[in-house]
Image (tube, grey):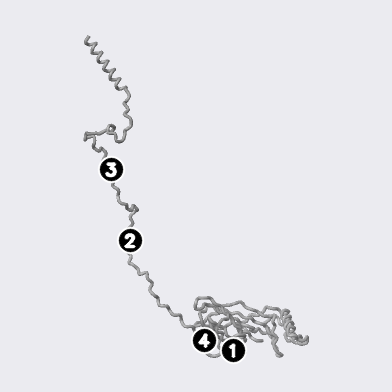
Amino acid sequence: MSVRYKHMLLWLGCVSLFSCNSMPPKNHGPIVLGDSATIVTESDPRRLQDLVTDLTPIIPASTNTDTPKTPVAAQPQQDTAKKPVAATPPPPPAALPAGPGLKAEFKETSIMIPGINAKIAGNGNLEKANGAVYTLEETTFNGKTMKITGNVTKVSQRYQSIVILKTKNGMLPLDNLTETTSWEQVKGGGNGSYPITGLDENSLEYSDANGNAIRNAVMKACNKRHLSHKKMQEWLSALGNVKKANQKPLVVSLRSVMWKIDGKDAQGKIFSKQIRVDVPM
């Protein structure tokens, strides 16, 4: 009986334990602020210890993480202030020679051909002019030199030649047999000197007209001057049977010559001046 009684007590104990564990938890409701009954206090100092280590981050100072550069040796400090440079005065312009001659005095440049006797057409004041025209009087350009002042960069020359029928009875210019050359640069001789060349009779270019063209030029020249038929026949007879424009009694003569002077003025502005000298027939 005692054994059975022990078993029964053990069984009742297990049933009681199971019943207690299966009971739903008691709901105490929400915590009310200020209600001391809902505040859980802990008196055990071991449970009040802070189990989380205080976070004290170490933030390094901002540094440049770029690849370190090789130190450059310090350069000596230069004086950036520009030192005043003494202005170099321009060389004085070459003066024109004294004495008679063809003279053209422009604002930017002056031109003179000593030994040439020429008369200017129109106003002789060339201060504001770009060109001038002269008429040659009883002289030639052979062996002459042009003198030029100012900042000249280039001097060019061109001329016009004419064929003249020349006999003991006079001269007949053949206007249809003229030749105008292109501009050619004149070589300077230094110090503003430019020798004049290529204007002598043997150097002049002339028309390449044949015999028939030359006879036609003679007849046109006679008609232009209103010569009689008899006078025209005399000129044609004096012409003969020439084949070229430089055969006698034909001569090649200078009709006019032109020079162009290019340069820069004192302010660096480009200028161009021209003079023309006509040779009377």
State the residue position of label 2: 72
Judging depth in this view, the residue of 49 and 79 nearest the camera is: 49
Residue at 50%, 86% (x, y): give it: 95
**89 and 247: which is toward the camera:** 89
Amino acid bearing label 4 = Leu
Q: Position of residue 263 (x, y in %)?
A: 53, 77
Residues at discs 1 and 4 in contact (Cβ within 8 Å): no
Q: Which mark, by number, is residue 88?
A: none
Q: Nearer the viewer, residue 207 or 125?
A: 125
Disc number at residue 55?
3
Q: Residue furthest top?
A: 1
Kind of residue at disc 1? Asn
Give the image location of residue 44, x and y in percent. 22, 33
- State the residue position of label 1: 117
Q: Amino acid at mark 2?
A: Val
Secondary structure under the numbered disc 1 in the rendered image: loop
Q: CA distance from mark 3 to mark 1?
A: 114 Å
Q: CA distance from mark 3 to mark 2?
A: 44 Å
Give x and y (percent) for residue 118: 60, 88
| N-term mark: 2 or 1 | 2
Earlier-in-chain disc, 3 versus 2: 3
Q: Position of residue 113 (x, y in %)?
A: 56, 86
Labels 1 and 4: the sequence-earlier one = 4
Taking 71 as reference, is 97 left or right? right
Q: Nearer the viewer, mark 3 or mark 2?
A: 3
Q: CA distance from mark 4 to mark 3?
A: 101 Å
Does the CB distance between marks 2 and 4 fall below 8 Å?
Answer: no
